[in-house]
Each structure stands twice: as structure tokens, then as C-alpha cells.
Amino acid sequence: MLCWSSALQALDLDDQLRLVIQAYGLEPALCEVDARVVKHGNPELGRLLFKSPVLSGDYDTSCGSCHQDQVALADGLPLAVGVGGAGKGNERLASDGVVVPRNAFTLFGRASAGFNTFFWDGKVMEIQGKIYSPLGEGFAQGFRSPLAVAAVLPILARDEFLGRQGMLNGNSHLERINSAYYADKVAAANQVLQEIIRNPEDPVVRELRALLAARGQTPDDFDLTMVGNALASFIAQKTAECPQTRWERYIEGDPSALTKTEKQGAVIFFGKGRCAGCHSGNRFSDLQFHSIGVPQGDLGPHMHGQDLGRADVTYQTEDRYRFRTPPLWLVSKTAPYGHNGRFETLDDVVRFHLNPIPFFVAHKWTSQRESLTYGKVLASRSFRLGFIDITSEDELTALIAFLKTL
């Protein structure tokens, strides 16, 4: 490593980055699409389902509520707002919607080949030809990709789609799906979907039926796997139409795509900043799970307002407060940051990686309970963070400038 670093320092910035690109095998990847996602779905059906609230229990929520075009298919909020929400962005915060205790992520890149780990806690993963999820093995159920499984999980979540607790009755989506266990949720959801597709008074349903008929399918075919495969194919189609980032232009051979400061930041990212240790490869994520000790607050999905992260999937103590490394595609457009949106700016979250102490001096505690219990979260911080060697404000400024090119 010392010889590598010394050799780099003897070269100009473009030569240094040329070696980095070769060493890491970097290629443009943002608009790359997994062929099987496109092949096995109905994107027109997916488009209608993505934009319409027809699948929500109270007819007030759609996928597009939290994945909006103007904020790179995220929602711009610290925590998403689900059922009962109205409007977009801050309008949803001011509405009577239910807070979903995790930050909504962008959908860009999720349809790319090899993107196999979904959600902050990785509850949907493709491993050795199988899709592991809370619904069981996805391929065996008819889902064609892990993205298809990931696409339907919000539809089965109480606060995201099913409806308010107060709406419980014998016919509600909430009672019938939320009370089912694991793979039984698929059967319960299929019953609900059959009722939705047979409502002749709903204009969206009439359009759904027409889209099915155009492909020689009947309302009897409308089930959860069809919904998931259709949504996945639409997401693939939608995210294939994306602007090329300046970093992608640079690695394709345009040295003018980055400024000198941004190139310096790239060298820091792949060098002494140690960022590529976790934000690796073309996706800028190892798709693994790490903790930076993000302050929990009081709105986590688990006991006492905590968010146990990966541990809620593996039930392993060592996985507490670990979350999947977020890919950095379009990162400057998807603030706020962290699994709970705790960091308002890139500067906040990058500085927190380096040293969490100044963050609490500047922002104070949001939770009185956590001011006494943060030690266990702090103890979970990845040992890798101890190898970061950014020692000046100029280096930090350059690093953040580089991140804005992704």
C-alpha cells in the first residue's frame, strides 16, 4: 500500500485516476439493466400500478408517493410518510400520514444486473440462485428477480400501503394480510388483489383489465407475482432512461468532465479516505452491512424506538445497528442521508464518518433516552472507519466535490 501510494503521488491527477479505474475495473453502471427483469414483466401494467393508489388499503398511497421524479426517485424526507399522506415532499410531513420509520431510497440502479440486496436491512437478497425474503423463496413463488420481491413488500406493509389500524374490520386489507404469516401473506394478498381487479366501478381497474387482455391474460391471472414482476419491469424501464453522471463521462475518457478539485476528491475517495473499502465497485456499494453509529432517535421500527438494522433479519447480536452500504449513485440529489435521514447534508454525513463527536455538539441530541444509551450504538461502529486519514478541510471539501459528480 505504501509503494502504491508513493507511485500515485508521482503522477498527475489524470494518471492517478487512470490507474485507479484500471485497478478497480470501474465502468459506467447507473443505467445498466438486468435483462431478466425486463423480459419477464409487463412495464405498462407496472407503470399504472406504480402511479395509482389502487393497491393501497385506503386508496391514498402509491409507489410514486415516496419515489418521485423531482428528487431522483426518492422523496426528499428524513423518514417516509405512508398511509394517510397527501402531496409530495414536505406536504406529506404536514399531512395526516403515518410516518414510516426509514428513509426512502432512490430506485436508480436497483434494476441493474448484480444488484442483489434490497432494503436497509437486506431483508430481500439473491444468494446462489435463490431469493431469500420474508415471503419465502422468491423464484419458487414465481417472482423473476429480487427486485420483483422487493417491489411488493411495501404493498404488504401496514404503514406503507395496507391502511390505518383504525380501519380494522372483516374486509380490510390490513387485517387479512397483516395477520398472515410469512408465505401465507402471498395467499392473503392474492385474495385481496382478486377483489380489487373485480371492481367494475373503478376506472383504474378497467384500465388494468384492458392491459391484461392485451396480453391474453384474464383477471384470474392477477396476483402478487404478476404485480411484482410488472413493477420491476417498469422500474427497469424508467431507470434505464437516466442522465449520464459526470463521473461516468470521466471514466469513459473525458478528462474535462471533472474539475481539478473533483479529481483530487476522487483520489482521496479511493485512497486515504478509505471510502472504497465499503462504497466499492461500479455501484459504489459492497452491498454488505456496516455501522457508522448513526444516532437512533425515537422513531425506529423496533422496541424503544430503536432500529436494529440487519440484526432484525439475522437475529445476530453482532449485526445490531448495521445497515446495507448505500450506493452513491446520484447521492447529491437524494438528501437527507442515513437509514433514518438523520443527516441533512453530505457534509454532515461525511464528517460523521470521520468523527461523530462534533456532530452532537452542533446538532444536540434528538432523544433524551439516547443521550444516556448511545454508547451501545457507538460501540457498533465499523473498525474500518479508524483507517480514514483525511486531515484537512481542503481534503474534505475535495471529497465532497467528487461525491457530487456521481
Image: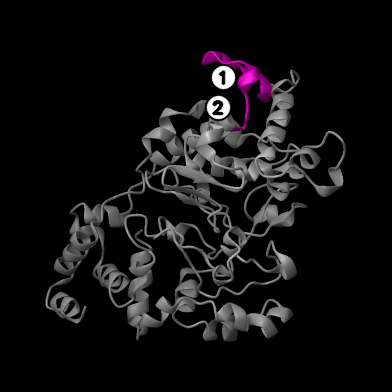
Of mark 2 and mark 1, the one earlier in the sequence is 2
Is residue 137 visible in the rendered structure shown here?
yes
* Residue 211's disc number: 1
Image quadrant containing the N terminus: bottom left
Residue stretch in magenta: 204-224
Label 2 neighbour load within 10 Å: few <14, some 14-19, many 20+: many
Question: For the residue marked with disc 2, what is the amino acid?
Answer: Leu
SS of the residue under disc 1:
helix
**Residue 45 - label:** 2
Q: What colouring does the structure picture have?
A: one colour
Labels in figure, total: 2
Residue drawn at 17 percent across, 76 percent down: 4
Q: Is residue 344 above or below residue 333?
A: below
Callout 2 secondary element? helix
Q: Is any atom of residue 47 visible in this view?
A: no
Rendered residue at 41%/82% (across/down) = 386
Residue 217 lies within the magenta run: yes
- Tell me whether the residue at label 2 lies in contact with that at label 1, contact meaning CB atoms closer than 8 angstroms: yes
- The answer to whether 119 is drawn above or below residue 12 in the figure is above
User: From mark 2 to mark 1, how far is it between C-alphas?
Assistant: 6 Å
Q: Which image quadrant: the C terminus? A: bottom left
